[in-house]
């Protein structure tokens, strides 16, 4: 791409922000209605269908979620380029920019541009990049005016001539840092409206931390309500895709008596049985936010949930079977979840019992329950559908 195009985008964005704010000064705080729209995740556009489908045992980035902010969040969380994925502060930084550019409206058009040609869509693509959006979408059989096409195109840009923006934002650890990085490297708006971009990014990150964003992200990967069914006091630990989908447990190499549920990032994870929460590790594999949970069941087993994001419980909490305790991690790449987002679950002997206590090594099968996999299969068989 010609760098002149990017410069033109920058000039135009500067103009847009000037026009949008009316006085050219930067707004320091978001209005209450802005905040309401973030926390309530107003719906601008509803996709008519997911991307790629969830027919296999592995979910792919799609448009799950109840509104555009959530759909965009979930899509970005599942982008995986060379085993690198975006962390929540980085996703918030991108979302804040898109909000400032377009209000997250894929049909947003503005012709107050230097040459009068329209800028368009969630990222306000302009000139050459807008042409490419149209041509690329047509090649993919997508309607370029949809959120679906634009998110896939944004990913395509990150994979190709905007790869440096992806690498740059991966270095950022805060929503504000990420917002600045995305403005400088992807939007190239010359710093225009930077305070708004940052304020939106921080508000989205806060909404995420409060569970007001990303909550419904398991919707496309399982039935409504997560498919929780209590069987003899037990609940299935994760929303099933459909009855044929879970990866067979016997493919797990080490530990041998463990189960991997391949699910999209953000999929809800549930307590298998009534119990109390033990250690919650929030930087698994040295990836901040990649988490694991120990659950001491009243059935006397210790359950270990691995490769999570957004844990909803703390050590010492009491939980009920079927209670949502966390989500499958959709970020952090191979250091967090290995070959793809999934819930790892096994159960072993708790402290104070023969063979119990301490940290279980991956290959220490002697301290895990060999009946757990057939038990999960039995639970699964009793699910409806
Ligand atoms: Zn595993």
Image (spheres, rainbow, N blue to C red):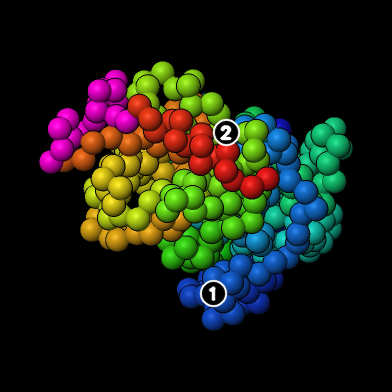
Name the residue nearer the viewer: 18 or 133: 133
Q: In the rendered structure, find residue 246 and report the number of the disc placed on it.
A: 2
Q: Quadrant of the C terminus?
A: top right
Where residue 87 sits: x, y (%)? 45, 45
Q: Which residue is mark 1?
A: 35
Q: Residue shown at 78%/41% (left/top)?
A: 133
State which mark lies toward you, 1 or 2. 2
Where residue 166 sits: x, y (%)? 53, 38
Name the residue nearer the viewer: 355 or 247: 355
Q: Quadrant of residue 138?
A: top right
Q: Residue shown at 68%/38% (left/top)?
A: 54
Magenta span includes 214: no
Name the residue nearer the viewer: 48 or 155: 48
Residue 44 in sight from this viewpoint: yes
Of the numbered discs 1 and 2, the one sitting upstream in the chain is 1
Q: Is 217 placed left or right of 88 in the picture?
A: right
Q: Is 118 placed left or right of 202 in the picture?
A: right
Where residue 173 sits: x, y (%)? 38, 48
SS category of the residue bearing label 1: helix
Characterize the magenta stretch by its predominant secondary structure: loop
Name the residue nearer the viewer: 34 or 356: 356
Task: Please state the extent of the stretch shown in magenta in the rendering.
Answer: 352-369
Mark 1 → mark 2, Cα distance in angstroms: 39 Å
Where residue 4 sits: x, y (%)? 70, 40
Q: Are the residues tagged 1 and 2 within 8 Å (C-beta)?
A: no
């Amino acid at each position: 791409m010609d760098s002149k195009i990017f410069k033109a985008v920058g000039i135009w964005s500067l103009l847009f922000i000037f026009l949008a704010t009316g006085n050219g000064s930067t707004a320091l705080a978001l209005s209450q209605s802005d905040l309401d729209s973030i926390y309530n995740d107003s719906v601008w556009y509803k996709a008519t269908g997911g991307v790629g489908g969830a027919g296999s045992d592995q979910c792919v980035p799609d448009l799950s979620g109840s509104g555009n902010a959530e759909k965009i969040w979930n899509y970005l969380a599942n982008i995986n380029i060379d085993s690198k994925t975006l962390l929540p502060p980085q996703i918030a930084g991108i979302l804040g920019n898109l909000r400032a550019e377009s209000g997250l409206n894929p049909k947003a058009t503005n012709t107050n541009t230097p040459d009068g040609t329209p800028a368009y869509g969630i990222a306000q693509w302009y000139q050459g990049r807008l042409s490419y959006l149209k041509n690329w979408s047509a090649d993919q059989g997508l309607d370029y005016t949809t959120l679906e096409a634009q998110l896939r195109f944004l990913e395509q840009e990150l994979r190709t001539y905007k790869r440096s923006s992806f690498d740059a934002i991966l270095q950022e650890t805060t929503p504000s840092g990420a917002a600045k990085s995305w403005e400088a490297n992807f939007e190239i708006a010359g710093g225009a409206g930077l305070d708004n971009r940052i304020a939106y990014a921080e508000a989205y990150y806060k909404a995420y931390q409060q569970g007001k964003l990303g909550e419904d992200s398991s919707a496309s990967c399982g039935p409504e309500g997560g498919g929780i069914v209590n069987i003899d006091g037990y609940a299935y630990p994760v929303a099933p895709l459909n009855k044929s989908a879970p990866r067979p447990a016997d493919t797990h190499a080490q530990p041998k008596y463990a189960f991997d549920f391949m699910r999209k990032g953000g999929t809800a994870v549930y307590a298998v049985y009534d119990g109390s929460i033990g250690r919650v590790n929030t930087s698994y594999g040295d990836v901040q936010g990649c988490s694991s949970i120990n659950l001491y069941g009243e059935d006397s087993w210790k359950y270990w949930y691995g490769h999570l994001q957004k844990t909803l419980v703390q050590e010492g909490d009491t939980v009920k079977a079927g209670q949502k305790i966390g989500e499958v991690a959709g970020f952090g790449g191979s250091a967090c979840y290995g070959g793809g987002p999934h819930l790892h679950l096994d159960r072993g002997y708790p402290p104070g019992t023969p063979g119990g206590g301490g940290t279980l090594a991956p290959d220490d099968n002697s301290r895990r329950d060999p009946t757990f996999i057939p038990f999960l299969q039995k639970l699964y068989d009793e699910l409806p559908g």
